[in-house]
Image: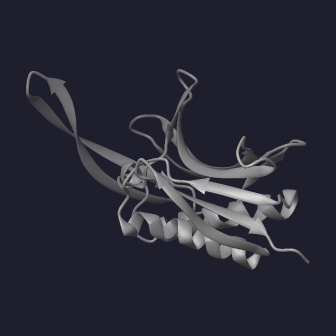
Amino acid sequence: MMLACVSWARYLDLGGGRYELMPIDFIYALDGDVSPSIFFSKTDGVVTVDLGSNPATGLSYSLFCALAPCVVPTGAMEYSFWIADYDPDTNHSDRIWHGSDTKHLIQGDYRPFVLYLVCEGLRVLVDRFRPQCVFIQTMSPNLPDKALAKYYQLGQVLTESGYQFGRVDPYHGYEAWLAKRKEQ
């Protein structure tokens, strides 16, 4: 596996209105062969892909794509995706839901590739479970059209997998979509 290192900087808040420029290096694990890990239970599934690490902080980052039962509508499964950071020193992990929070991590040509992985995660999980309905919603309200475009790409994946994909009425700025499996 080839690795690519990208450098950038961010400001570290020292308190009292003082900031220090802190360089950050990110080593991508996406060059070369990408080997997702796939986990299934009887009711749900998760696809994970190692995205890379930051040697300055010791954090590693992974993409998670999950399909799990949801309460409404009955029989539906909800698809969600996020990036998680992991600190091996503290065994602590945080989920990163919003794309704008990943701009400093996933840059340039890697962003479309990560979106491709999100779409392929959906394809793998839907092919495995074949749910009657798939529900998808934004994790943040009032997203711009550019941010919503990825959800329509997920809709294309569902359409190609035999589903009718449509938007559900927004709720307090949160957008949602429902895909129903077409009768054969």
Which quadrant of the structure image shows residue 127? bottom right
Looking at this view, name the residue that lies furthest to the front.
Answer: 169
> In this rendering, is residue 165 above or below 105?
below
Query: For this view, does 64 lie left or right of residue 11?
Result: right
Q: Quadrant of the C terminus?
A: bottom right
Relative depth, front residue between 18 and 170: 170
Q: Is residue 32 visible?
A: no
Query: For this view, does 16 lie left or right of residue 149?
Result: left
Relative depth, front residue between 105 and 74: 74
Which quadrant of the structure image shows residue 84? top right
Point out residue 123 in the picture as x, y percentages from the top left corner. Answer: 74, 66
Q: Is residue 167 visible?
A: yes
Q: Measuring 38% from the left and 38% from the top, which residue is drawn there?
A: 56
Q: Measuring 72% from the left and 40% from the top, which residue is drawn there?
A: 71
Point out residue 97 in the picture as x, y percentages from the top left corner. Answer: 48, 46
> In this rendering, is residue 184 above or below 64?
below
Total labels: the figure holds 0
Point out residue 57 in the picture as x, y percentages from the top left corner. Answer: 41, 34
For the rendered model, the colour scheme is one colour
Query: For this view, does 50 lie left or right of residue 180?
Result: left
Q: Measuring 40% from the left and 62% from the top, which residue is drawn there?
A: 107
Relative depth, front residue between 113 and 2: 113
Point out residue 45 in the picture as x, y percentages from the top left corner. Answer: 79, 47
Q: Quadrant of the N terminus?
A: bottom right
Relative depth, front residue between 33 and 99: 99
